[in-house]
Amino acid sequence: MAEHVTRRLHGKGRKRILALDGGGTRGIITIAFLEEIERLLAARFVEQGRYRDPADFRLAHYFDLIGGTSVGALIATQLALGHSAAEIRDRFRLWMPEIFKRRMTGIKGVSDLYHARNLSDKIRSLVADETMDSPLLKTGLAIVAKRADTGSVWVMTNNEHCKYWSREGDRTPNAKYKIHDVLRASSAAPTFFRPTEIELFSGVDGNKPFTTTGTFIDGAVSPHNNPALQLFKLARLKGYALNWKTGPDNLLMISIGTGSHATEVKRSRLLAREATDALVGMIGDSQQLVLAVMQWLSYPREPWEIDREIGTQSEDLLTDEPMLSFQRYDMPLDYRWLSDNDPKMTGRRRGPKLKDALYEARFKRTIADLQELIAPTTVPVLYDLATAAAQDQVMAVDFPGQFDDGICPDPTGEVSA
């Protein structure tokens, strides 16, 4: 295990978490927000004299733990490896049409729609055979998946103090899980890609070698497509062995969505269609629940409306004091939000950049097109809209100055002054 990651996860001091939602090709929305965050922080640290060139800054230098689900896990891994947001954007645009090339025999609700090997090949080109204890990881990484054969949610990390990090008996140590396999597990969306296997046990029974695997599917079909609450649990629950200190001056979390929207369960003669709509709707419900809990634990600068009855919870707090600094960025794919026709619904007003981008988008795509989980052709329009939304939402105040301490500007983990 790399010493610099151990220091990030287990050293003293304030901690910073980045949580990235799943969302298929809508992951480009997340990337647009990451670019704005990276730009803002790079400019700050150049001004402070920590960096000479803003191009040298990476979000892995700032965040102590970066976690994600599905496409959020793929983006989180690239960030943890030290890739810039622009590099991830260019790779995403190139990869999406290739990964989501329809199988000739793919039938919705009957067989997998896309070749898992296309996704697998792209992941391998990124991480090769690196394992979760890879020294190439610059900071803490958490990937959320669901084990289908037991129905349990798994969060797999490069935390050397976690319970199953080292080999115990025949158990394959978490440290030696291949990053490729973990990413495939987190992104194995039902009906899109087939489930994948991860080796959990290996040994010799008598004279006969054996291997036992677990079957994994996309972490989005758990309560943690928005992984913010899972990452907060990771930071605090004793079983995960991080035990980070809480409080708005000690723990910061930035959560980024992929374009939320309400999902209608349409009546259909095909029960599989109704079931799919219901499943997607439950994913959205879980995301809203996670957001409600995280806002209940904090006082976000700009809270989101949960529903019309409880509003933004701006006057509600679960504990006597906020447990963390928290801010959520997202671009709801709802016409009322995007067009600002009903500002009372969200309590949010945006600047002219997003309105100008929306005006251009109206002639290219409908809102229904933009809501699609898998639609490589909408990536350019979503990126333009999200870039404008990020410029409106991301603010320096969301990254309080007290969290600037302990930035790691190089892979050796040397802390800047």
Image (cartoon, rainbow, N blue to C red):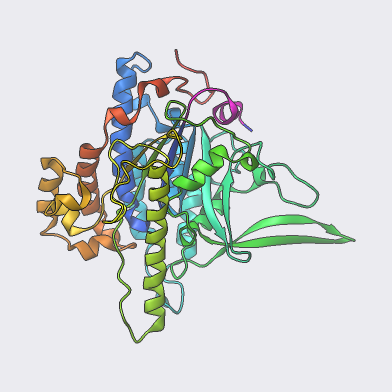
Q: Quadrant of the C terminus?
A: top left
Q: Is residue 271 above or below residue 256?
A: below
Pinpoint residue 192: horizontal percent, then vertical percent. 43, 67
**Which contiguous range is marked in magenta?**
2-15
Q: Is residue 106 left or right of residue 185?
A: left
Residue 10 magenta: yes
Pinpoint residue 49: horizontal percent, then vertical percent. 35, 13
Total numbered labels = 0
Residue 394 placement: quadrant: top left
Q: Is residue 337 left or right of residue 211?
A: left
**Is residue 159 at least partly visible in the picture?**
yes
Which residue is the extreme one toward the bottom?
269
Give me the residue at 37% from left, 84% from top.
270
**Closest to the observer: 337 or 75?**
337
Residue 288 placement: quadrant: bottom left
**Is residue 108 at least partly visible in the picture?**
no
Pinpoint residue 149: horizontal percent, then vertical percent. 62, 66
Q: Quadrant of the N terminus?
A: top right
**Closest to the observer: 39 or 308?**
308
Residue 101 magenta: no
Pinpoint residue 416: horizontal percent, then vertical percent. 45, 16
Q: Is residue 62 above or below residue 120?
A: above
Q: Is residue 327 left or right of residue 215?
A: left
